Image (cartoon, rainbow, N blue to C red):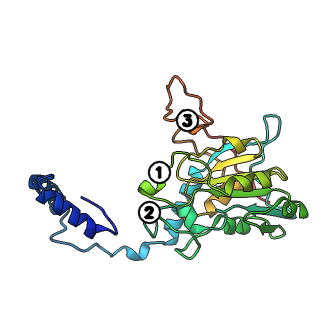
Amino acid sequence: MVMVPYDYPEFIDGLTNLVNKNLIPVSRIDDAVKRILRVKFAMGLFENPLADDSQADFLGAQEHRELAREAVRKSLVLLKNGKSAYDGPVLPLPRKAQRILVAGTHADNLGYQCGGWTIEWQGLSGNNLTSGTTILKAIKDTVDRSTLVVFNENPDPAFINSDDFAYAIVVVGEQPYAETNGDNLNLTLPAPGPDIIKNVCSHIKCVVVVVSGRPLVIEPYLQSMDALVAAWLPGTEGQGVADVLFGDYGFTGKLARTWFKRVDQLPMNVGDAHYDPLFPFEFGLTTQPIKQT
């Protein structure tokens, strides 16, 4: 089955031309059609061609969102917790502070949290795509009422130093993609993510949350961070991220694949002679939930 979304007339013309030139035998077309029809018959699509919409009202139901929120909490992977081995842990974060800074391209963008294959094929940017909670909104809903949350997507050092921030949460990552649009030979953190990390983490205690569908090159910035969290693609439930950052639940997630240092190490898998990861397969620090007062 060929899935050409937009230029299918050109595909049809091209395929027809190749068949007419005997470059693709008709038997190859017949074989493909037979296999597709066989699956459709087995699924009963010719007897019942329309989807069953009796459960449609449950889409986006609160109980389903709560389950998704739980999945977010359990999938977060804590990669670093403390500036060095001699420092105490940074996470969980205190809810009560005079003011905290939230920065980053992905802190207030529901489309970025969802990634590709959501609402639209390649995904979208923005907060008007579907119902959900951004990580920024979740942070605001979680901290103490007396805590002022200041959001600046890409703050400069002057702004960071202008206020007495207790700490910062930096949320950066990849833009949405699907299929070949996600092909990337560098796997670097897209701009302005590195600059945001540098500007914020060099001036204030910071927790970096990476929103991505895969490991990215993060080693050059790791030393400047006080804590690092791989949030993957939390979808609509940014509240699941805040649940763990502030200690309602502990970090329990483990890496489902090796996190490399540099792309020239790839491919790299457990057992390879050159296995030298930044974070090994199944790595993940843990924390305990804290009792809120």
Q: Nearer the viewer, mark 3 or mark 2?
A: 3
x and y percent of residue 209 in the render? 67, 53
Q: Earlier in the sequence, mark 2 or mark 1?
A: 2
Residue topped by disc 3: 264
**Label placed on residue 183:** 1
For residue 57, side relative to residue 104 (left or right):
left
The residue drawn where x is 67% and y is 66% is: 138
Residue nearest the viewer, comparing 8 with 46? 8
CB-based contact (under 8 Å), mark 2 and mark 1: no
Q: Is residue 129 above or below residue 226?
A: below
Q: Earlier in the sequence, mark 3 or mark 2?
A: 2
| Tally of numbered discs | 3
Please, what is the three-letter code of the amino acid marked with disc 2? Trp
Mark 3: secondary structure: helix
Residue topped by disc 2: 117
The residue drawn where x is 84% and y is 53% is: 204
Task: Judge whether residue 247 can be spotted in this image.
Answer: no
Please, what is the three-letter code of the amino acid marked with disc 3? Asp
Q: Residue furthest left?
A: 27
Residue nearest the viewer, comparing 120 with 226? 120
The residue drawn where x is 18% and y is 65% is: 44
Give me the C-alpha separation between circle 3 and circle 1: 16 Å
